[in-house]
């Protein structure tokens, strides 16, 4: 029993400590040190998941969190505009999450049906029925806009597109919803929060995933912004817990980023 208790704590404490230390370095502009610690965390999580199979679900979740930062720091810049850079960060993470979900939820020898794929995009495991309601779309637009206004006041970011042409808006919308929003919610809510919840319960899981979600925004170098992102994480985490629907929280997240990096910087009314 004592070993089992220590093993469960190790599954949470060790990767968390490494991620927090790595993001503290990134917050202080030590990108290389942050990259090294995140790589160390990925290596340790892989090794621990092999030898301590009981906590393997948590270790893979923490490895995915570090993978996001490794790709962010280490990916070569192919384009002048950073908006075109995001798919190269998030697509590998989404593919890794899909493979992890496939191994755990699709029995060997069975076919990958459209129903199963719909389960993945809804953030469901093999025992849950996917659900989606039409009102999720307008609700996500309203919530995303409200959150983006507050976040713009806190952060005052520049636009990620050079102008408000329809083509640029379409690219930004696709990237923010289907790559950034879906990719981050897949990692922090559907995988990390769900797996921590199995060990601690929903309240601690929501708080814990929101904390790591906020910490992983350390690249903006703002304490106030990190606190705000933590609050947004709590809202997204609770929404995912109640709706059991990944698409809804991904839409909220994606629309928040879309308004934050398009209409609000160009509007000028919050300056």
Image (spheres, rainbow, N blue to C red):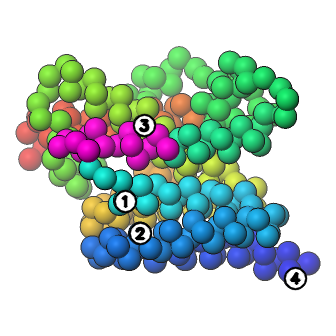
Q: In the rendered image, which residue does mark 4 sit on? A: 2
Of pointers 4 and 1, the one earlier in the residue sequence: 4
Which residue position holds label 1?
Answer: 74
Residue 2 occupies quadrant: bottom right
Q: Position of residue 178 (x, y in %)?
A: 43, 32
In the foreground, 56 or 2:
56
Instruction: Please give the residue where the numbered disc 2 appears in the rendered image.
Output: 35
Q: Nearer the viewer, mark 4 or mark 2?
A: 2
Label 2 close to label 3 by CB (< 8 Å):
no
The residues bearing labels 4 and 2 have C-alpha atoms spaced at a distance of 34 Å
Residue 16 point in image, percent of width and height? 57, 71
Q: Is residue 237 visible?
A: no
Cα separation, mark 4 vs mark 3, equals 42 Å
Circles 1 and 2 in contact, beta carbons < 8 Å: yes
Picture quadrant where residue 32 is located: bottom left
Q: Earlier in the sequence, mark 1 or mark 2?
A: 2
Residue 159's x, y, as percent?
17, 41
Q: Residue at x 49, y 44 (%)?
A: 92
Residue positioned most to the right: 1
Residue depicted at x 69% and y 60%:
58
**Residue 179: numbered disc:** 3
Q: Using the image, determine if residue 3 lies above or below residue 171.
A: below
Residue sitting at x 57%, y 65% = 42
Q: Secondary structure at mark 2?
A: helix
Q: Read off the magenta span.
A: 78-92
């Amino acid at each position: 029993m004592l070993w089992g208790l220590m093993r469960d704590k190790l599954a949470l404490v060790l990767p968390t400590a490494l991620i927090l230390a790595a993001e503290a370095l990134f917050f202080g502009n030590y990108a290389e040190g942050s990259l090294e610690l995140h790589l160390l965390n990925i290596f340790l999580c892989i090794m621990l998941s092999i030898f301590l199979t009981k906590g393997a679900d948590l270790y893979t979740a923490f490895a995915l969190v570090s993978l996001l930062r490794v790709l962010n720091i280490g990916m070569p810049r192919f384009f002048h505009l950073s908006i075109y850079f995001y798919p190269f960060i998030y697509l590998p993470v989404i593919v890794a999450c899909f493979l992890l979900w496939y191994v755990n939820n699709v029995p060997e020898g069975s076919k990958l049906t459209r129903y199963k794929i719909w389960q993945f995009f809804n953030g469901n495991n093999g025992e849950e029925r996917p659900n989606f309601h039409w009102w999720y779309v307008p609700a996500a637009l309203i919530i995303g806009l409200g959150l983006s206004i507050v976040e713009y006041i806190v952060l005052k970011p520049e636009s990620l597109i050079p102008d408000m042409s329809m083509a640029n808006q379409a690219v930004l919308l696709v990237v923010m919803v289907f790559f950034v929003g879906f990719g981050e919610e897949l990692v922090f809510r559907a995988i990390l929060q769900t797996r921590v919840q199995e060990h601690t319960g929903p309240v601690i899981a929501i708080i814990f995933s929101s904390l790591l979600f906020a910490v992983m925004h350390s690249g903006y170098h703002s304490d106030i912004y990190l606190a705000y992102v933590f609050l947004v994480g709590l809202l997204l985490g609770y929404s995912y817990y109640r709706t059991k629907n990944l698409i809804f929280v991904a839409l909220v997240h994606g629309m928040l980023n879309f308004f934050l990096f398009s209409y609000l910087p160009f509007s000028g009314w919050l300056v």
